[in-house]
Amino acid sequence: MINITPNRGLALLLVVLIVFSLIMVFVSYQGQRVTNGVRAYIYGEGQWTKAQKQATNALYKYLYTGNPDYYDLFHESLTVIDGDQIGREAALSDNRDFELARQGFLQGKNHPEDVDDMIWILKYYHLMPDFQAAVDIWVQGESRIEDKRVLAERIFERHTTDTLDQELIDRFSEELMALDLDLTRLEVEFSDSMSRAARQAETLVFWVTVLTSTILIFAVGFMAFIYIQKTRSSNREIKRSEFRLRNVLENSVDLIYQHNLREGGYDFVSSSSYEILGIEPETLKEAGPEYLINRIHPDDRVRMNKELQRLEGRDIDEFTIGDSEFRVQKPNGEYVWVQNRRTLIRDSSGEIAAVVGNVRDITPLKEQVGQINQSLMEKKLLLSEIHHRVKNNLAVISSLIEAQKMEMDELQTDHLNELQGRIKSIALIHDKLYKTENLSEVELSQYMQELTEIIANTYRSDGRKIELEYDLEPIKSNIVKAVPVGMICNELINNAFKHAFDEAQNGCLRLKLGVNNETVELIIEDDAGKLPQNFTVDGHDSLGMTLVKTLTSQLEGELYTSVEKGEFTRFNVRFKL
C-alpha cells in the first residue's frame, strides 16, 4: 500500500491542479489558434476575391481597349492569388517549407500576425472535414484562375496580331463572365465551409473542456478519498518505522552517532559505544566531542582535533569530509583502532547542520595488515637476495669462463667471449632488479644504454671510435620480457662491433626504443652498410642470428632488416608489452 503523507498528498493535489490548468491553457490556446486561423482564412478569402475581381475587370478593359497597362494590371492582381497558392503548397508538400509558406501568405496580403496560425491549421487540416472541403474548393478556384490566365493569353495574342473582331470580343466576354460566375460560386462555397469549420472547432473545444473538467473532478475526489484513508494510518506507520530504525541502530555492531554542528554536541549515540569504546552512550552525549578527543592517542590527536575544528568552523562548505582512522583509549587503558565514516546532513535551507557517523572497531584488521606488511617485507628482502645471488652466481660463471679461455685457441676464445656477453646481459638485469624498489620491473631504456656502454668499452680498447646515439623512451618491463630483450640487444650490438665495424675506425651506432599502440619497437642500426644485398633473416643460420630469431619468437614479436639510404643497416624488433 502506498504511503501518502500530508505533505505528499497536498503536493499530489497541487500537481493535478497544475496539470489541469496546463491542459486548459493548452486547449484554450489551440482553440484560439483554430479560431484565429479560420478568421484569417475568411479574411484572406476576401483579399483573394478582391484580387480576382480586380483581375477580371482589368481583363475586361484590356479586351475592349487593347491597352497593355490593363493586361499588366491583370497579372499584377493575380500575384495575391499566386501568393496564397505558394503558401498552401509549401505547407502541404512532402518536404514542407514553412518559411516559403510564410512568404507566400504575406504575398497574398494576409495579416502578418495571422500567417503562423494559417500555416498551423494546414498542418492538421485533415482532422477537420469542413476545412478540408474548403481547401478542395480553394484548389478548384486556382484551377479556374489558370483557365482565366489561358483566356488572357488568347486575348493578348489576338490583340498582338490585330486579329480581334467584335465576334471574338463577344465570345471572350462570355467566357470571362462564365469563369467569373464560377469563381464567385466557389468563393461562396469556401466561405460556407470555413464557417462550418469554425463552428466545428468551437464545439470541439467546448467538449474537450467539459471532458477535462469532469476528469479533474473525479481525480480530485479520488485523491481526496485516498488522502484521507492514508493520513489515518500514516502516523501509525511512522511510529512503526521509527521503532524499527531505532531497533536497528541500537543493535548495530558499529557505533552510530549524529554530531550537531550548531550546538556542538551529540544528538544521538548508539549503545554500541560501550562495546567498542567502553564508554556509555549517555556519557558521550553529555560530555560531547571534546571528551572523546582527549582519549585519542597523542600521535592521532592533533590531526583529529584539526578535523573537528574544521567541522565546527565556518569553512565547512569547502571541507571535503571523508573517512578517518585513529586510536582511542578505553577506560581500562587499552587502545583500539577505529574507523570513522561520516556524512554531512543539510537542513531544509541547504545549510550543513550535522554529521552522521559510523564508527567501527578495526583493531583486528590493523593487526592483520601489520602481519601482512611484515611478511611482504620479508619476502621482498628474500627476493632481493635471490636477484643478488643470481647476479653473483652468473659473475662466478663468467669468471670460470674467463679462466677457461686461457687454455683455448683464438677461435674458441671468441666463442667464449660471446657466451660471456650473453651471461653479462642476464646478470645486468638481475642487478637492475636488485636495485629497484618493486623487484619486478626493469627500466628498459636505462638497461639498454648501460648494456651498450659495457659492450662498446670492450671494443674501444682497439682504438676504434664508434659514436653511440640513443633515442630511448622510458619503458618498464618484467623479467620475462627483459631477459630476451637484453640478449637480443647483446647479439645485435656485438654483431655490429664485430662484423660491421671490423675494419672501420669511425662509425655510428643508433639505438631506438618506443611504444606505439601498446607495441614496443626496438631498432638497432649502424652506418657501416655491410649487410649483404641478398641477406634474409630466415636464410642466415649463424648462432647469433638463430638466437635473435628464437628470442624474438619468445617475445611473440617480429624481426625486420633493411638498408636505408645513407648506408644504414637496420634491425627492427617489434613485440607487445
Image (tube, helix red, strand yellow):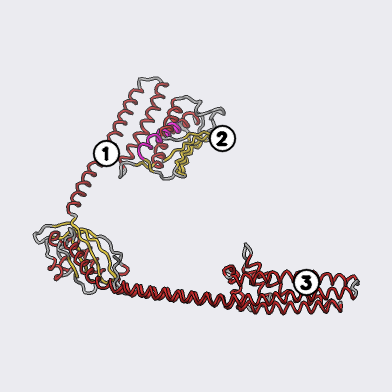
Q: Secondary structure at mark 1?
A: helix
Magenta region: which residues? 478-494
From the top left corner, tell me how far across and down residue 572 is, in percent.
Answer: 49, 36
| Residue pointed to by mark 2 | 567
From the top left corner, tell me how far across and down residue 218 is, in percent.
Answer: 38, 74
From the top left corner, tell me how far across and down residue 384 is, in percent.
Answer: 27, 39
| Residue pointed to by mark 3 | 148
Q: Amino acid under label 3? A: Lys
Q: 127 and 493: which one is in front? A: 127
**Mark 3 or mark 2: which comes first in sequence?**
3
Q: Secondary structure at mark 3?
A: helix
Q: Name the side, left or right, on which 323 lies relative to 476.
A: left
Q: Secondary structure at mark 2?
A: loop
From the top left corner, tell me how far across and down residue 244 is, in percent.
Answer: 20, 64
Q: Which mark is residue 68?
A: none
**Principal secondary structure, stretch drawn in magenta:** helix
Q: Name the side, left or right, on which 157 lies relative to 537.
A: right
| Residue pointed to by mark 1 | 383
How far apart marks 2 and 1 lie (CA) works out to 46 Å
**Mark 2 or mark 1: which comes first in sequence?**
1
State the quadrant of the N terminus.
bottom left
Q: 361 and 140: which one is in front? A: 140
Q: Nearer the viewer, mark 3 or mark 2?
A: 3
How far apart marks 3 and 2 lie (CA) works out to 90 Å
Q: 203 and 426: which one is in front? A: 203
